[in-house]
Amino acid sequence: MIYDNTIIALATPSGAGAIAVIRLSGKQAILFAENHFKSVSGKVLKEQKTHTIHLGHIIDKNRTIDEVLVSLFKNPNSYTGEDVVEISCHGSNYIQQEIIQMFLREGCRMATAGEFTLRAFLNGKLDLSQAEAVADLISSDNAASHQIAIQQMRGGFSSEIAKLREELLNFASLIELELDFAEEDVEFADRTQFKELVDRIIFVLKRLIDSFAVGNVIKNGIPVAIVGEPNVGKSTLLNALLNEDRAIVSEIAGTTRDTIEDEISIGGIGFRFIDTAGIRDTIDVVESIGIKKTFEKIDQAQVVVYISPLTPEGGIAHGTLIEIEKIKNKYPLKNLIVVFNKIDMFSNEKIANIQSSIVNRQSSIENIQFISAKTGQGMVEFKNMLLDFVNTGALRNNDTIVTNSRHYDSLIKALQEVDKVKFGLESNLSGDLLAIDIRQALYHFGEITGEITNDDLLGNIFANFCIGK
């Protein structure tokens, strides 16, 4: 790929709208725009200051295509670090394509996915982890994932890694210097301070690695499987959570024969709810396949909601406790909420007595919630219980949270190498052996921020971006 030419792309979603933004970046971006832009005040674009906006018309030969606003960003003070021109035109598909095709004929090249951000990285405007955070920010669909992406795009994660890398690099330089004076048997690196540094690096790396468990589910949405016997209100609960008729509700048992999924945000956290087929013994082939899928979804879920209706007398339905124990035994590490549905059949006084009786008698069930999926009673408390399973303390404290699997993999590898360095120090290994492991740790730190890259890595990362960003 040649990065010294001028690229162009639509920066807003394709399709008709009120306005569209067409972005150019490269050495000739201003010249290309100048050739086809006629300012209403007679201004010459190349003579204008950076970060200014100008009203005029886009002209193709003698034909006026549209009245536009042209935003000017001169290098190096632009997103890409190059000259950038953004043309805000009317959102007609025809107008968009006419302008883009005109500049392509002029000598521009269509930008590839993520190429504007790639150029920002290559020109030192962003490091690699910040560039990846741009894609996360674009795809964020709840407050938590947005907060994490903003923090990483501002360099919170990068600065933490860069600080560790710099400290380790300083000691590595001293170790390498010792190798040049091996015959004199001198030590430039204080081994006591080095051990303290290694311990601190290990502590920070473990904290970042542990944060991935929270960050990954926040980024991708927390999967919640709604399970139970047929006709207990699973689909009604899903519809109540989504506030729409997403799943078919019927008094006929076995209505849901496949899984139905949808996602909502609760307290700024994304939850992906999965309505499953009712668990029961059946000879129906199609329903049996649905029940098999139910257990597959339980395997994938982080939270399992087992729903069961209260009996007309206010008791627990026959077989409920047996099924709950089966799930607890089969999935001992799963977060389990037992939801007793249809409390709308009872008075408030009766409900209070039922709740007290069941909670006191079923001490082996840690999380019990009483709701009416039909009327919405108890749904606020149920949602709060779901939020309790998510560690949002790190979010509230603006701690660094790792959400990127590539970063997680590099952190794991860096920790392994730093552990080797610690073992080498404790075993009084020679400096040349320590230097090997230190170099490897530095390599994995560099992979995260982009000091160390290759074309395949960059291709994989930026291929996931949208064109125009």
Image (cartoon, grey):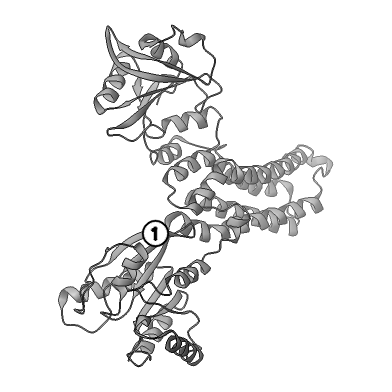
Task: Classify 362 as above or below 425.
Answer: below
- Which residue, given by chain and number where applicable, does mark 1 sit on? 264
Task: Classify 380 as above or below 444.
Answer: below
Q: For label 1, count other residues whose C-alpha is less than 10 Å away and answer few (under 14), some (14-19) or many (20+).
A: some
User: How many tags in the picture?
Assistant: 1
Task: Classify 195 as above or below 234.
Answer: above
The N terminus lies in which quarter of the figure?
A: top left
User: Which residue is depicted at the point 42% across and 33% down?
Assistant: 469
- Decide if residue 439 is in sight here: no
User: Which residue is depicted at the point 47% across and 75% down?
Assistant: 333
Please name whichever residue, 292 or 196, is drawn nearer the observer in this view of the structure.
Answer: 292
291 sits to left or right of 392:
left
Instruction: Classify mark 1: helix, strand or loop.
Output: strand
Percent coordinates x, y for residue 406 in the rendering: 49, 49
Quadrant in which residue 209 is drawn = bottom right
Which amino acid type is marked by label 1? Ile
- Decide if residue 106 is in sight here: yes
435 sits to left or right of 74:
right
251 sits to left or right of 185:
left
